[in-house]
Image (cartoon, grey):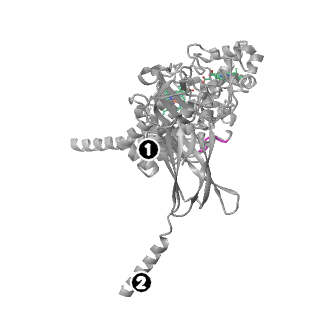
């Protein structure tokens, strides 16, 4: 009798366990549906169109593994995901500037990774002109991952797991930098945020409160010339009144173009998920959104190189600021922040 | 199978094989030979002097050659041009890289060769590339996307850079800092290219020209170019770095 109970409970236990495993598998498995190119209808045509790099479940899965693997750094200590945290829309919460290999400090705030395929150029100064070549920058930067591209390829070639995964994704075991860069682009390129409450409001699937709506109206009036809907950036470089910091010596876009007019201009960042990406600006100088709005309502002169819109002046009451902040928080996209496709496969599911 | 059929098969196979031994295609081999003045370049061990008499050594010398165009006199009197696709990285450290073999060019009397030093703007913007343009070749700027067209590194006692280094990384495809330069060299004597013929052309690249004309470089004032600052000055200097040795 006792034996019978033992058998029954053991088999129930096994059944539950295997069900849990099946469930988990589903969580981590990337299907064809998961990598389908399905762009939000109200977004413009993407700039990076995956023409020579159609995402596949195998390619994406490999890109995900690489994104979270410190093997890409010199001493295997830092992965892309170390700096780009999923919960912060792949920015880095609470760090004004990035920390890299051996705790070395970078010069800039880690930006979120979202809607990258609509970006003509990347980085705060637009120095990178194609999503595929972007990872070469952190991999080879001495204060980020400090590795050499040739060595990365050799390290991957020595790994059984990776030769197998590259074979599954590309049909042969030869690992090249192009394949590495393309699978990373499959992974980061599909990071699309288009399901915030704002988006749902625009699609008539949700409503916004009176405060939020007033914030939206003010935003369209005062901010949207630069932070243009629906991407919340017009992809231009502007001086938003940020003062030059003589310790960082970061003068922005001028470093890329050599054009004096570009002194202290930075790429207009998207404000999607801005609630999660604090601190703010290229060097993380503002801790919270209130400080950002206080910055915008200061007065600027021509001499400060500020954009004409700021020289003309943006005036907001304290209530206006509160309302704009309430609106900005409707840009938080929980669907994206908790999207299982982008979770670290080494982590326990949460 | 009957014997006769077997023999027939062999004959058929032989005939087929014979008709396939077409004449070998012509080959044009471009040998790039790096010099400093009149001396063949020697990495590390040899000491050279610039126009101002400042001494220097060379530890690295690499550059991209692309968009090769060959001019030949066709049957009529006008010139025909053949464009060769491909990007070639000439690297002093890698002897094989200094030989560009072009096969199957049209027959004709070749009179001049034109090529670009650098990489066209399209290929500076096209994402991840392979072959000579693979970023593993360390001829790629990551922070400001684009290829380094020419890389010369070495040392000079008058250099004020750490370790007395000389570092000339020249690239950039955007105006006004475009460093792509096009070079045309006339063949000293027009050479014929036809089936079964291999012709070698030796192209001399004089590294000393980087620092000579039109702008003489003073290593105590300029020992490092790694972005657009001063890049076009060096590009204008390398424009006349090549000549044909025959």
Image x and y of residue B121, in percent = 63, 40
Instruction: Please report the residue visible at 50 percent of the width from the left and 26 percent of the height from the top.
Output: B166
Image x and y of residue A214, in percent = 72, 22
Q: Nearer the viewer, residue A23 or A102?
A: A102
Badge 1 crowding class, 10 Å Cα cut-off, few under 14, some 14 to 19, many 20 or more, is few
Q: Which residue is mark 2?
A: B8
Q: Nearer the viewer, residue B93 or A156?
A: B93
Q: Is residue B22 above or below residue B149?
A: below
Dot 2 falls on which chain?
A: B
Image x and y of residue B194, in percent = 56, 62
Dot 1 falls on which chain?
A: B
Image quadrant assignment for residue A77: top left
Q: Which residue is mark 1?
A: B95
Question: Which one is earlier in the sequence, the residue at label 1 or at label 2?
Answer: 2
Q: Is residue B22 above or below residue A297?
A: below
Q: Is residue A212 above or below residue A114?
A: above
Using the rendered image, report if marks 1 and 2 lie on a common chain.
yes
Q: Quadrant of the C terminus of chain A?
A: top left
Per the image, label 1 sits on a secondary structure element best described as helix
Image x and y of residue A236, in percent = 68, 29
Q: Nearer the viewer, residue A104 or A24?
A: A104
Residue with the most extreme right position? A312
Residue A231 belongs to the span the image colors magenta = no
In the rendered structure, which segment of residues is drawn in magenta?
Answer: A45-49
């Amino acid at each position: 009798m006792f034996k019978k109970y033992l058998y029954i409970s053991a088999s129930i236990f096994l059944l539950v366990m295997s069900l849990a495993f099946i469930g988990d598998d589903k969580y981590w498995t990337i299907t064809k549906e998961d990598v389908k190119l399905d762009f939000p209808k109200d977004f413009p045509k993407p700039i990076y169109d995956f023409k020579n790099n159609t995402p596949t479940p195998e390619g994406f899965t490999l890109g995900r593994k690489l994104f979270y693997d410190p093997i890409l750094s010199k001493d295997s200590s830092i992965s892309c995901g170390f700096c780009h945290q999923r919960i912060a829309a792949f920015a880095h919460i609470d760090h004004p500037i990035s920390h890299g290999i051996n705790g070395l400090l970078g010069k800039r705030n880690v930006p979120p990774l979202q809607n990258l395929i609509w970006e003509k150029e990347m980085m705060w100064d637009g120095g990178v002109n194609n999503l595929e070549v972007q990872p070469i920058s952190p991999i080879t930067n001495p204060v980020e991952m400090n590795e050499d591209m040739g060595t990365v390829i050799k390290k991957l070639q020595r790994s059984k797991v990776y030769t197998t995964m590259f074979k599954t994704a590309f049909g042969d075991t030869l690992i090249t930098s192009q394949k590495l860069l393309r699978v990373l682009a499959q992974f980061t390129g599909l990071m699309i945020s288009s399901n915030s409450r704002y988006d749902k409001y625009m699609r008539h699937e949700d409503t916004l409160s009176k405060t939020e709506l007033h914030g939206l109206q003010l935003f369209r009036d005062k901010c949207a010339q630069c932070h243009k809907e629906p991407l919340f950036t017009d992809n231009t470089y502007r001086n938003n009144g940020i003062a030059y910091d003589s310790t960082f010596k970061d003068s922005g876009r001028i470093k890329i173009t050599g054009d004096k007019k570009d002194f202290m201009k930075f790429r207009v960042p998207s404000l999607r998920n801005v609630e999660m990406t604090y601190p703010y600006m290229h060097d993380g100088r503002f801790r919270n959104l209130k400080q950002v709005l206080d910055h915008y309502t200061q007065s600027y002169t021509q001499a400060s190189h500020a954009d004409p819109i700021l020289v003309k002046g943006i005036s907001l009451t304290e209530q206006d600021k509160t309302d704009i902040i309430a609106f900005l928080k409707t840009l938080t996209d929980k669907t994206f922040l908790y999207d299982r496709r982008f979770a670290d496969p080494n982590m326990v599911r949460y | 199978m009957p014997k006769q059929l077997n023999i027939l098969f062999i004959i058929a196979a032989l005939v087929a094989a014979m008709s396939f031994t077409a004449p070998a295609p012509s080959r044009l081999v471009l040998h790039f030979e790096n010099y400093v003045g009149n001396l063949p370049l020697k990495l590390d061990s040899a000491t050279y002097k610039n126009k101002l008499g400042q001494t220097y050594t060379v530890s690295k010398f690499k550059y991209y050659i692309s968009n090769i165009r060959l001019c030949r006199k066709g049957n009529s009197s006008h010139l025909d041009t053949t464009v060769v696709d491909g990007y070639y990285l000439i690297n002093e450290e890698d002897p094989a890289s200094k030989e560009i073999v072009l096969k199957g060019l049209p027959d004709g009397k070749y009179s001049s060769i034109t090529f670009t030093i650098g990489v066209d703007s399209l290929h500076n913007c096209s994402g991840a590339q392979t072959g000579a343009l693979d970023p593993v070749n360390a001829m790629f700027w990551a922070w400001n996307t684009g290829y380094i067209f020419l890389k010369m590194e070495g040392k000079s006692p008058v250099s004020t850079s750490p370790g007395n280094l000389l570092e000339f990384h020249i690239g950039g495809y955007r105006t006004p800092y475009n460093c792509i330069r096009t070079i045309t060299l006339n063949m000293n004597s027009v050479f014929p290219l036809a089936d079964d013929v291999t012709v070698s052309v030796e192209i001399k690249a004089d590294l000393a020209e980087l620092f000579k004309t039109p702008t003489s470089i003073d290593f105590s004032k300029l020992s490092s170019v790694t972005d657009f600052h001063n890049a076009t000055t060096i590009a204008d200097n390398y424009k006349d770095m090549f000549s044909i040795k025959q």
